[in-house]
């Protein structure tokens, strides 16, 4: 079962910030600075959490992962914007 997650992070060191950003690009779409929307399976969520856990310094940095619910449900309806509306990415097949 796939779910939609909102991931936000606050990283103090520029090198760790860049590494975190590059890692997040592999899991979701950037919505704003340090905020990503990710369509993940349970396994992918664990892998993401493990990677973030390895990057951040726990006494300086933080990351927040919010479960917005199943992709097939009303997860995208839980997102409201004030001001400029950002398109909520649609998950589609990737052909390599």
Image (spheres, rainbow, N blue to C red):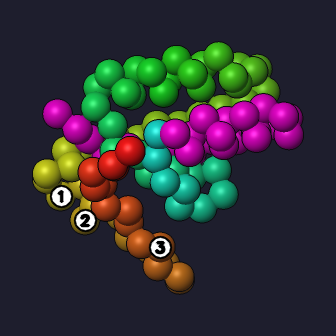
Q: Secondary structure at mark 2?
A: helix
Q: Which residues are magenta?
A: 1-26
* Element class at badge 1: loop
Residue 86 is labelled as 3
Q: Residues within 10 Å of mark 2 (few under 14, many from 20)?
A: few
| Quadrant hosting residue 42 | top left
Above or below for 36 versus 67? below
In the rendered image, which quarter is residue 57 located in? Answer: top right
Rendered image quadrant of residue 3:
top left
Q: Is residue 6 visible?
A: no
SS category of the residue bearing label 3: loop
Residue 22 image position (x, y, % from top left): 65, 40
Judge from the rendering whether residue 25 lies leftward or rightward of residue 92; answer left or right. Answer: right
- Residue at the location (21% across, 49% down)? 71
Asked if one can make out residue 80 in the rendered structure from this viewpoint, the answer is yes
Could you say which is closer to the camera, residue 84 or residue 27?
A: 27
Q: Say if mark 1 contacts mark 2, CB within 8 Å.
A: yes
**Residue at coordinates 17% horizontally, 33% vertically from top-left?**
1
Is 94 placed above or below 81 here? Answer: above
**Which percent across, then down, holds residue 69?**
24, 45
Cα distance in 3D space between marks 3 and 2: 13 Å
Spatial CA distance of label 3 from label 1 is 17 Å
Where is residue 25 drawn, in percent x and y? 56, 45
Q: Which residue is mark 1?
A: 74
Which of discs 3 and 1 lies nearer the camera? The answer is 3
Q: Say above or below: 34 vs 84.
A: above
Quick check: 33 left or right of 90? right
Q: Which mark is residue 77?
A: 2
């Amino acid at each position: 079962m796939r779910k939609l997650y909102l991931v936000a992070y606050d990283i103090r060191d520029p090198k760790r910030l860049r590494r975190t950003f590059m890692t997040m690009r592999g899991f979701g779409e950037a919505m704003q600075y340090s905020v990503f929307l990710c369509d993940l399976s349970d396994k992918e969520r664990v892998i993401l959490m493990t990677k973030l856990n390895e990057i951040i310094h726990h006494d300086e940095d933080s990351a927040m992962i919010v479960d917005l619910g199943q992709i097939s449900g009303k997860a995208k309806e839980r997102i409201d914007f004030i001001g400029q509306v950002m398109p909520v990415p649609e998950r589609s097949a990737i052909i390599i």
